[in-house]
Image (tube, grey):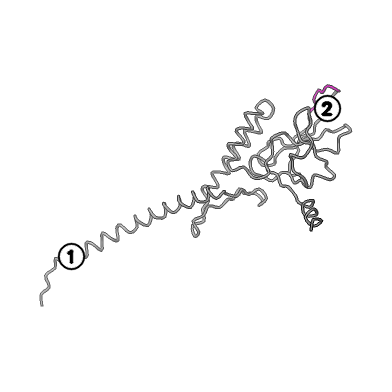
Amino acid sequence: MQDAAATSASNRLYVYHCYCSRVVLVLDTMLESLPVRITDGSRVALLASQVQKVNAVDAGSVLLQRANGIERQHRLKCARCGLRLFYKATGTAHDEFLYIVNGALFLKPPVAPAIAAAAFHRKNAAGDAAGAKAALEAASALRQTTHILADKRANRTIVNDGSDSSGDEELTNDQLASEYNSNARVVAAAARSKRKPEEELQSEEKRRRKGTLMTS
């Protein structure tokens, strides 16, 4: 029994999201358990064993002056919002590592990605202002789409970000209840406005019947 539990735990995968809710990294271990690079606080993962999937695009290379010489970083960014997420220290003895930018990923899609992106933008304004701004705009657009698209038959809000399902954001129970109540109020108001003319016509018809003298 213990062996089965250990095997299950060892086979577990951890899916991480960008601030815009897109799935960008799959690890076989918790991000918090990875060693931290003292230089910049990034997490260090072994590409060959710990990293199962990286969903990011090329963001170019930069040269950085370090205490022990020049470091060339090959950077990767989110394909949706452009926020820098990872880098590799190429041309060194550390090519087998993936460096994960400190504070750039979530284990679950942020409930309020726009707020999270704004906080990250303030924290990293000097280095990634353009990417954080793009993340903020993408998150805002995602939230607007979430509130606009409604399934009329079930009165429930659905999410459609226009990309693959791996980037979908699930609503919390509180959000779903709020959207349901909002939709219910709109439907009830529409029903009342529709019934009002019909009720007035029926009332007028009754008055006419009462005031009509029937003769043989």
The residue lying furthest to the front in this view is 2
Query: Is the residue 172 above or below the residue 65 in the image?
Result: below
Which residue is identified by label 2? 71
Q: Residue at x 55, y 47 (%)?
A: 146
Tell which of 209 and 115 is nearer to you: 115
Q: In the figure, is residue 61 to the left or right of 92? A: left
SS state under label 2:
strand
Q: Is residue 213 above or below residue 47?
A: below
Task: Point out the stretch of residues depicted in magenta.
Answer: 61-68
- Judge whether residue 160 is colored magenta: no
Pinpoint residue 145: horizontal percent, then vertical percent: 55, 46
Front-most of residues 192 and 104: 104
| Discs 2/1, front | 2
Q: Quadrant of the C terminus?
A: bottom left
- Dominant secondary-structure state across the stretch colored magenta: strand
Query: In this rendering, is residue 83 above or below 154?
Result: above
Q: Which residue is mark 1?
A: 208
Task: Determine the image quadrant of residue 127.
Answer: top right
For image coordinates 21% across by 61% down, the residue present is 204
Measured as percent of width and height from the top left, residue 133 is found at 62, 33
Q: In which image quadrant can residue 32 be found?
A: top right
The earlier-in-sequence mark between 2 and 1 is: 2
For numbered disc 1, what is the local secondary structure?
helix
Q: Amino acid at mark 1?
A: Arg
